[in-house]
Amino acid sequence: MQRLQVLLPRGLRSGGSAPPLAWPPGPRSRRPPRAPPAGPGPRPGLRLRLSPCSRPLRQPAAAGPDAPPSRPSTMERPGSGGINSSESENVSRKNEMSEEFEASTVDSLINMPFATIDIKDDYAITDVPQIRLKRNIENEQIKNDQIKKKKRQKDYQPNYFLSIPITNKEIIGGIKILQNAIIQQDKRLAKAMVSDGSFHITLLVMQLLNEDEVNIGINALLELKPCIEEILQGKHLTLPFQGIDTFGNQVGFVKLAEGDHIIPLLEIAETAKKTFQEKGILAGESRSFKPHLTFMKLSKAPWLRKNGVKKIDPELYEKFISHKFGEELCSRIDLCSMLKKKQSDGYYHCESSIVIGLLERLFRRGKV
């Protein structure tokens, strides 16, 4: 083992050479207290630069007659354990007291009522990335729903409607006379005529794509009934028909005569539209509601256009311009399909119906 000898300045030397300093130091152990160095102090003007880890040498008190012989001063390498026994005991005791204090503090905290509380939960601190992720998912869902809704509106093609059936035989008979008069003038138009079992007033058109939506439509119709009764206020709704008109010379219909019945009928139509739309059903048309009774449509026979029939000539029905066809007592509203097979009497496939007006009161009294 190599030994490192350190020479002290002449002022620190005391007879004889200093004992060699062993390096590296051996295992740490407690050492007996070291006697202060004897002899004169450092030479004036000379500074001894000590390591931060080394403690300065204590100046001894005046040496008594019984003082042990002095030992030469030596420098020790930092970290070699240059601490006396009393200081070492003080440090050890402080460490033990610190450990005991920490242990007792932890034990006391564990026993306190808030020791098991999760600060994150107590102060509602949440994970920001999770919140953002959730918001992004919700926004994406809303965006997708809006896209689907716009696409559905773009592809909106009504296939169901609310119908007020025409059952008055006087009205039905008058329309058949009108149809025959037109056919006599142009037999090609026979295929454009509406069958007598299908006469009705369309109250509202809508799109129902599956059975679930049909069931929603049925529920909406049932919810509509008390609203209609409130509108009618116990009165019956009579619809008089008089005169002929067309939509763009493509659809021929019998007009609804003017009168007090128009206001409640329009109100019923508007309430029906609102009720169905609130259920999430696409319903209604861009044009305003105009009640009418259709008796012919050129679209029923597309080949007519190829054969030169592009419009309904007003001369075909001029004799019926002011004809009175009769009055219909409105007693029922049906949810009908435009596409499903018609019933045996020629009327549309009916999913559900509600009874209203005078007939409803008769049902309640048991007279019908």
Image (cartoon, rainbow, N blue to C red):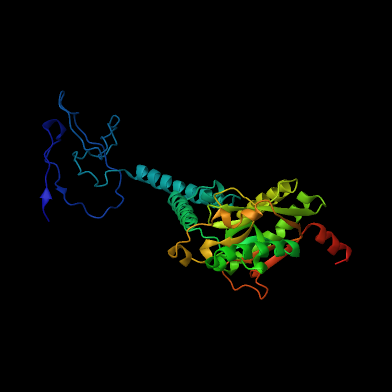
Rendered residue at 64%/70% (across/down): 349
Which residue is situated farthest in the bottom direction here?
344
Rendered residue at 12%/50% (across/down): 3
- How many labels sit on residues? 0
Quadrant for the C terminus, please: bottom right
Expressed as whole percent of the image width and height from the top left, the position of residue 65 reads: 28, 33
Q: Is 48 rendered above or below residue 358? A: above
Q: Is 190 rendered above or below residue 39? A: below
Expressed as whole percent of the image width and height from the top left, the position of residue 360 reads: 81, 60
Kindly tell me whether residue 225 is visible in this rendering.
yes
Expressed as whole percent of the image width and height from the top left, the position of residue 247 reads: 56, 53
Task: Report the front residue among 87 and 298.
Answer: 298
Relative placement, left or right, of 48 versus 346 is left
Expressed as whole percent of the image width and height from the top left, the position of residue 282 reads: 56, 56
Kindly tell me whether residue 279 is visible in this rendering.
no
Task: Report the front residue among 282 and 308.
Answer: 308
Task: Report the front residue among 368 and 50.
Answer: 368
Quadrant for the N terminus, please: bottom left
* Quarter of image, res 10: top left
